[in-house]
Amino acid sequence: MLLRPTSTTFANLTIMDQLSRQQWITLILAFANSALVSLFPPYDYLSLERGNIPTFAGFYWLLGSHSNHVINSNFLTLEIIVIAINAGIAWMLLANKPEASKKSQRYQRGVLVMVAINLTAMLLFPPFENYSAITKAVLPSFEGFYFVFSDNSQRQLVTPILTIEIVLLLINAGLLLLFLKDKGKEKLTPAQIRALAERLRALQR
C-alpha cells in the first residue's frame, strides 16, 4: 500500500529545504569572511628605532609589498577561529529543535547571540600594550582596549590575554547552555511504570 503525501508532509519538506538553504548561506558567508580575513591579514611593523619590537600596523593586502612588516599569525588565527565559532552559532540558531521547549530554546538562542556579539566585540577592541612597556616577563602587560582599526602604531597586540578572554567566554557560555538545557519529559507515575513493566514481561514471553 502506497502512502500518499499530505499537505503537512509538503509543508515540512518546504521548511527543511528553506532551512537547508539558510544553513548553506551561513557556510558560504563563513568561507567568504575567512577568505577576506586571509587576503587582508593583520601586520606588525618592525622598527629599528624601537629595537625591532613589533607594533600593530593594521590590515594590508596579502600580495602587496610591505617592507619591515610581518603577519601577526596569532591574531589571524584568532580571527579565523571566531569566524568559525560564529558560523557554528548561526548554524545552531537556524536548526529546528522540536524536542526542546520554546522557553528553553529562547534562552539558549539568547545565550548564543550574546556569545557571537561578545566574540565580535573582542576582536574589534582587543587588548594592547605600549611598545615601551614590553618586557621579558612571563605574564604580558597591557595598556587597555582600543579599536582595532584606529591608530595603534605605538602599541602591540596582547594575544595571550585575548586568547584567555575568548576561552573563558566559551567556557562560561557552555556551562550556561548546559544549565538552560531542557530537562525533557516529566517522570512516569507509578501506574505508568507498572503498565510499562507488564508490557515488557508480555514481550519477553
Image: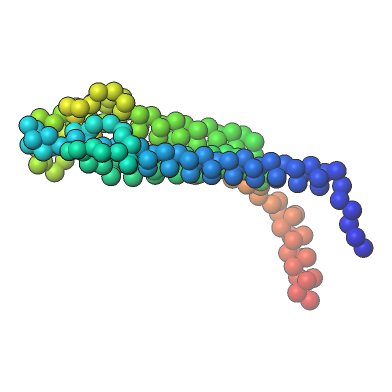
Residue 161 visible within the image = no
Decide if residue 5 is on the left or right side of residue 109: right
Camera-nearest residue between 153 and 89: 153
How many numbered discs? 0
* Quadrant of the rendered image containing residue 17: top right
**Colouring convention used in this rendered image of the protein:** rainbow
Report x, y in % for residue 154: 17, 27
Camera-nearest residue between 7 and 20: 20
Residue located at (48% from left, 44% from top): 31
Residue located at (19% from left, 38% from top): 67
Decide if residue 198 is on the left or right side of residue 58: right
Residue located at (9% from left, 42% from top): 136
Q: Quadrant of the N terminus?
A: bottom right
Residue 10 visible within the image = yes
Q: As drawn, which residue projects farthest toward the bottom?
A: 205
Report x, y in % for residue 134: 12, 35
Report x, y in % for residue 196: 74, 61
Q: Is residue 187 above or below residue 119?
A: below
Residue located at (79% from left, 76% from top): 205
Report x, y in % for residue 116: 46, 34
Q: As drawn, which residue projects farthest toward the front?
A: 65
Camera-nearest residue between 114 and 134: 134
* Quadrant of the rendered image containing residue 38: top left
